[in-house]
Amino acid sequence: MTWVDDAPPPHPSITPRTALRILRRAVPIAVLVFGGLVVLLALRPLEAAVNGPRRPWTPRITRGVCVGALWFMGLRRMAVGTPMRGGGALVSNHASWLDIFVLNAGGCIVFVSKAEVARWPGIGWLARATGTVFVTRDRHAAQRDVATLHARLALGQTLVFFPEGTSTDGLRVLPFKPTLFAPLIALQMPVQPVTLTYRAPDGADPRAYGWWGDMDFGLHLLSTLAHRRQGSVTVTYHAVQQLTALTDRKALAANLTQCVRDAL
């Protein structure tokens, strides 16, 4: 499913001053992201030799890069509550590619994504390099996906899911898909709902940070960097819920949807 709206926000006109502002932000972000990626990939063989499948070092690099990228961008990040640590799952609303930076900045986490993302140009390569777990939506592969998630939990990793199944304009929370909670219930893992609330820069369209439908990533990136002053994002970490084998996935999906929606 892909969420769509009638008309996305217009892209700003690129003046010489705007172009300079974009470059002033884009260049250090690019150096930081790709420089951090080089260090991460160089360190991973040693990390694997010392720690096996555990990754205690490289996620810290990813977190530092994301904190720095938000700082260079000028997007203020504020947190309410405390993110869970160790084996479990964060479930969050999904508004933008910015969510990856915002959530990574809060802790060492591992994203769970649909398998198609692995084949996306650029984004797919970065996702694979940073350890994203890719799962299919094929029922025949369900047991394999559960086994993969169980192995990650056994390593003490915190997994991140976007149960809406699509990104939106950031002004709403779509109903969470119950089917996505089946493996979480099967593994009886602790789950923490998270709300991402974006506030657009003064005078900008309230949907300025939303990235949805068939919006072009490059144009949206330029539009985001072009704002004279950036807005902010608030990350609300709600109470952790412990799932059991008796948890009803439809009731759980409805409960978590409402929890995330109320904070937005």
Image: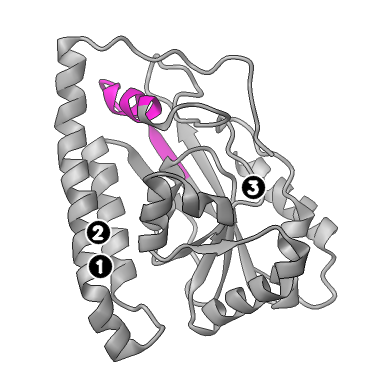
Determine the image quadrant of residue 192.
bottom right
Residue with the mark numbered 2: 37
Residue type at mark 1 is: Leu
Mark 3 → mark 2, Cα distance in angstroms: 32 Å
Decide: marks 2, 1 in contact (CB < 8 A)?
A: yes
Residue with the mark numbered 1: 41
Determine the image quadrant of residue 136.
bottom right
Residue name at image x 37 percent, y 19 percent: 202
Residue type at mark 2 is: Leu
Residue name at image x 26 percent, y 36 percent: 73
Q: Is residue 260 left or right of residue 158?
A: right
Whole-percent x and y of residue 234? 45, 43
User: Between 254 and 181, which is closer to the camera in this rendering?
Assistant: 181
User: Between 95 and 77, which is closer to the camera in this rendering?
Assistant: 95
Whole-percent x and y of residue 151? 56, 81
Residue with the mark numbered 3: 260
Few, some or many residues within 10 Å of mark 3 (<14, 14–19, 20+): many
- Per the rendered image, the range of residues in magenta is 219-234
Element marked by disc 2 = helix
Viewport quadrant of the C terminus = top right
Whole-percent x and y of residue 175? 74, 43
Mark 3 → mark 1, Cα distance in angstroms: 35 Å
